[in-house]
Amino acid sequence: MSLRNALLACGLCLSTPSLAAEQPLLSPPPPLQQQGLPTLKLGRTCPELQTAIRSAVGGQASAWSISVLDPGGQLLADVNGSIPRIPASNQKLISSAFALDQLGPDFRLKTQLLRHADGSLEIVGEGDPDLSIAEMQKFAMVALGQGGSRSGQPSTGPIRLMVREEPPQRWWPSDWHPADRSYAYGAPITRLALTSNALHMAVQNPAARLQRVLDTSARNQGGSLQMVVVNPEQREQATSRAPEDPVVLHSEDSAPMHALLSLANTESHNFTAEVLLREAADDWDVGRASLANIQWMQKQALPIQGMRIRDGSGLSRGNRVTSRTIAALLLRMGRHPLAPYYQASMAIAGQRGTLRYLYSGTPLQGRFWGKTGTLSGVRAISGILDTPTGTRYVSMISNGGSAPNSVMGRVLRATQSLSRCPSWNADVSQPAVPG
């Protein structure tokens, strides 16, 4: 089964709090109404939860940032929540929220064969992570049939086919470690990426692979294609001055946005997250796209002190974010009209994705929707926890801590069991959150 079909078969995979163990939804959820931007309230915490979290991290507090919010924006507990840390794949929560808000749940990445007014043929793409060899063979067949001429009559010589693609210096964010670039998870980010530019390892020269596929397809049809790579920005400037709109000869669409979000967050697919960042920003320069993502965060009234965005996937060690920022983002998206799509994109404790084997058989199973993050020396987990007294938004980031899985489990269980804060039940005023 292709990646696209697998994602569509999953549907939205969203369990509601009261139906956590039942079948996933198979149709899009209704949109929610906008409920306003979040405001963090730092005054009234739950001392028992704060103590439990401090106990969970023990002597490793300096390596951890942990924040817990309720639906009203109250910071219930916080350990070093204002210290920016490397988030690893928790970065995907940021880029996917940006993409969902900017592009909507039904957006699809398009790959198209165009015929311009002068008869020239061009393939343009938007980074479909499931673009297949079979689909590219269809493009080659249609191009051969057109012959590269305005009349549509077959040509006897090689057919010139332009391919709009990023230059090699943009295939990877500049600070991705060279070793990561050789693995499938660190594949180059290009507009035309057969099987996400990955086989058992990363495809180091995706343009050459594309050329081979087109050549083979053309020869099998008794023809010949001459592929010419063109600079996207120069080409876009040139086509914008063209007197006629190009004709779309053939088009292949990706899975819809809600499925792409699930691929990025549930399965932690780096290539998809990078494409979503660029498409949301409408800019394939990762530096400018990252700046657009930060500006979007500002517009959401989120606390972004110390924040740095270097990519969309979290593979960059130059990213920095606080646990308060991520918890506030989760709260913000919980109030967003498209909130069900965002929550549905996450892994579920003990049930699916990167959380499939975590917390199975515990009260957390089916009650925590989250995103994991792992780099050498970095562990993170953030998400939405269903508790007996309502939703909690939790973010935990460890840079250098030991036994992080145990700490994370203890924090989540404490948050769930202490959701009805004992001191609040006694109506005792609480001190401000420690910095």
Image (spheres, rainbow, N blue to C red):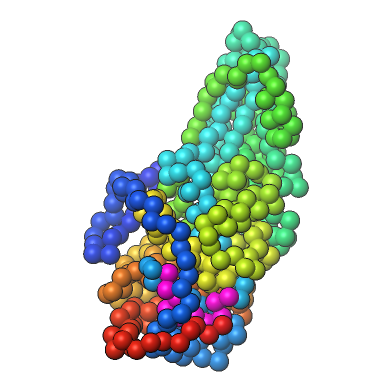
Can residue 68 be seen in the rendering of this structure?
A: no
**Residue at (59% x, 35% y) in the render:** 125
Q: Is residue 213 or residue 93 the one in the foreground?
A: 93
Q: In the image, is 157 to the left or to the right of 136?
A: right
- How far from the left and from the top, in percent, is residue 199? 58, 50
**Residue at (56% x, 66% y) in the render:** 303
- How far from the left and from the top, in percent, is residue 221? 58, 21
Q: Above or below — where is 256 with respect to 215?
A: below
- How far from the left and from the top, in percent, is residue 65? 55, 78
**Residue at (52% x, 24% y) in the render:** 250
Q: Is residue 240 magenta?
A: no
Indicate the quadrant containing the N terminus: top left, top right, bottom left or bottom right.
Answer: top left
**Residue at (60% x, 46% y) in the render:** 281
Residue stretch rendered in magenta on the structure:
73-82
Q: Is residue 221 or residue 345 the one in the foreground?
A: 345
Q: Is residue 81 magenta?
A: yes
- How far from the left and from the top, in percent, is residue 376? 62, 73
